[in-house]
Amino acid sequence: MKKILLFQVFDCKDQARALEFDQCVRHNLELGFDEIIIFNDNVPPRYFGKNIRNIEVDKRLTYKDFIELAQSPKNYGNFLVLINTDIKLDKKMFELERILGEKTLIALARYEVGDRLADMPWCTQDVWVLVGQPIPKSILFQSDIPLGVPGCELRFSELMFNVGFQVFNPCMDIKNLHVHKNQVPHSDENRVFGAYLFTPACGLNDVFNKSANAWPIPHYLTSFVPKLFTMQECKD
């Protein structure tokens, strides 16, 4: 099983923030991935190596890019990881191999400095893991969502769940670190509305044993009603 990492690099004007990104990238380059694909958004490549493939683009990385990678026949059976650039991956990431199979998406919540799990881990994920496999074309049409847009991870997970993928968040065992000292709240101005998937924090054994407390719950959010609905509430 070939291990492939995908992330983006872009022009960050904030020097302190740019250093945080660089720290994360250099950490992740040393973890032992067989191939590292870097989407360089309007910047020249700055990281090089025999296992690094640089792609120059003029747009933000999207979930569609991840799906295109996963559904390429040359990647069938490979271990594919998509991350936000400000994440330091846990060295135990590759333990996910034992629970990862076809029709499974791992969506991992992050940890903040001090080994503190993010608030509301069921709805804030920064790392996604798939085995390369055929994926319905409808996902390609719907997943052209840039990383970093509010609600993007919840919408993507729901799309995959909707076509039969099991979605799990074993962040109790895999602890990926979010490196961002001066965080500011997200604005809802560009939020992705619609069906969301809330994926509870669990452990690897919960996933392996298909424990009930690991299963996700679909919700629905609109721009005109200031509350979340469960699917049952929507039906009623």
Image: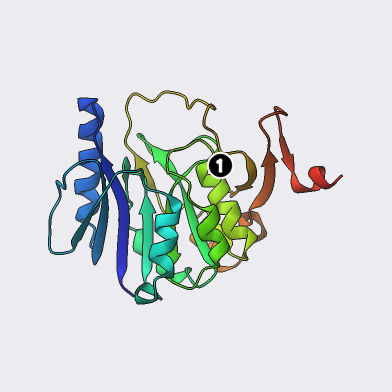
Horizontally, residue 197 falls left or right of residue 177, namely right
Q: Is residue 213 above or below residue 192?
A: below
Q: Picture quarter containing residue 114?
A: top left
The N terminus: image quadrant:
bottom left
Q: Is residue 112 left or right of residue 53?
A: right
Please tell me which residue lies in front, 57 or 124. 57
Residue 236 coordinates in the image, percent (x, y): 87, 44
Quick check: can you spot residue 64?
yes
In the displayed structure, does residue 18 sit left or right of residue 124? Answer: left
In the picture, measured across the screen, residue 16 lies left or right of residue 114, that is left
Q: Which residue is mark 1?
A: 123
Q: Residue 135: percent from the left, percent from the top?
A: 52, 68
Q: Count the numbered circles shown.
A: 1
Residue 48 against residue 51 in the figure, above or below: above
Task: Look at the numbered disc 1 and give the secondary structure of its residue.
Answer: helix
Which coloring applies here?
A: rainbow
Foreground: 145 or 98? 145
Q: Is residue 42 above or below residue 18?
A: below
- Of residues 171 and 42, which is closer to you in this image? 42
Residue 139: image location, x then y, percent? 54, 60
Q: Residue at x 41, y 40 (%)?
A: 111
Binning the other alpha carbons within 10 Å of mark 1 as few (below 14), some (14 to 19) or many (20 upward) gives: some
Q: Residue at x 51, y 43 (%)?
A: 152
Q: Residue furthest right?
A: 236
Counting from the top left corner in percent of width and height, residue 14 is at: 24, 25
Q: Check disc 1 and give the amino acid type.
A: Cys
Q: Residue at x 71, y 31 (%)?
A: 227
Q: Residue at x 20, y 33 (%)?
A: 19
Evaluate whether residue 206 shows in this view. Answer: no
